[in-house]
Amino acid sequence: MAGNMNITLKVWRQKNANTKGKLVSYNAKDVSPDMSFLEMIDEVNEVLIKKGDEPIAFDHDCREGICGMCSMVIDGRPHGPKEGITTCQLHMRSFKDGDTITIEPWRAKGFPVLKDLVVDRSAFDRIIQAGGYISVNTGVTIDANAIAISKQDSDKAFDAATCIGCGACVAACKNASAMLFLSAKVSQLSLLPQGHPERKSRVENMLQQMEDEGFGNCSNTGACSVECPKEIGQEHIARLNREFIAAKASSDNV
């Protein structure tokens, strides 16, 4: 069984959005390989606090791969070297004794740095809000079995709904595009009958909001799907494009 490790960290430190940041080196000593990556940072912060230094600011909440808050680029990869996981699910056994690990925040115009590794991801909230509501019957509850949805469509909708909005797709994209995130949200509703009444206005409004937030365009490199912790596929971007083309064709004919 592997013993404990000594690791060198190069962490992006930035006081606030209006100041310049830089990489600062820290030593993480006697690190257990069974620690999660966030637990390792917790221990580094305990040492910093005891010394009277400012701890490293980073986002976290559930630590179960559900909330998507643990957004950081580790050695150039969103959420680190493993695929299909968030940072909180990454363990130190993925590294070796003596390694130097570089930790940075998401890099995108739409995700301004608030402090250290913490970025403002409220742009994603505004994109979802731009999608508006869905038309539902607020009267007597309809039995779920009365709404016919094919197994194939329900599976695809569920796959899209697994998106946790972490922003790894944006961080992985050379254009800082949010198309995978946006496509997951549009695809989820376009596949279900409850989302059909507003499907045309939804895709147009959400795409416009994405552009307004400063995210780039998709150039189909596929990096977003590779780094997505929920492994959401490129087929959702294809569906988004079809939805948008159909919506524009319909608008132009009005």
Image (cartoon, grey):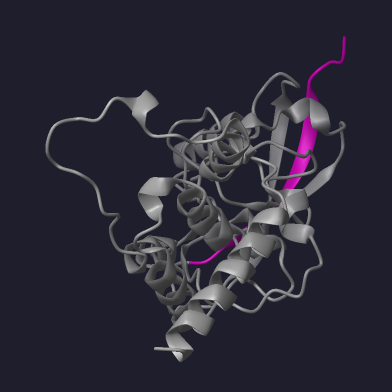
Q: Residue at x 67, y 46 (%)?
A: 232
Q: Residue at x 71, y 61 (%)?
A: 172
The residue lying furthest to the top in this view is 1
* Magenta-span inclusion, residue 7: yes
Q: Which secondary structure dominates the residues rendered in magenta? A: strand
Residue 207 shown in magenta: no
Q: Quadrant of residue 179?
A: bottom right
Image quadrant containing the C terminus: bottom left
Q: Position of residue 66 (x, y in %)?
A: 50, 34
Left or right: residue 2 compared with residue 30: right
Viewer-proximal residue, 232 or 125?
232
Residue 156 falls in which quadrant of the image?
top right
Residue depicted at 34% across the width and 69% down the height: 130
Q: Which residues are magenta?
A: 1-14
Q: Quadrant for the N terminus, please.
A: top right
Say which quarter of the image contains residue 196.
bottom left
Q: Is residue 244 visible?
A: yes
Q: Is 211 drawn above or below residue 100 in the view shown?
A: below
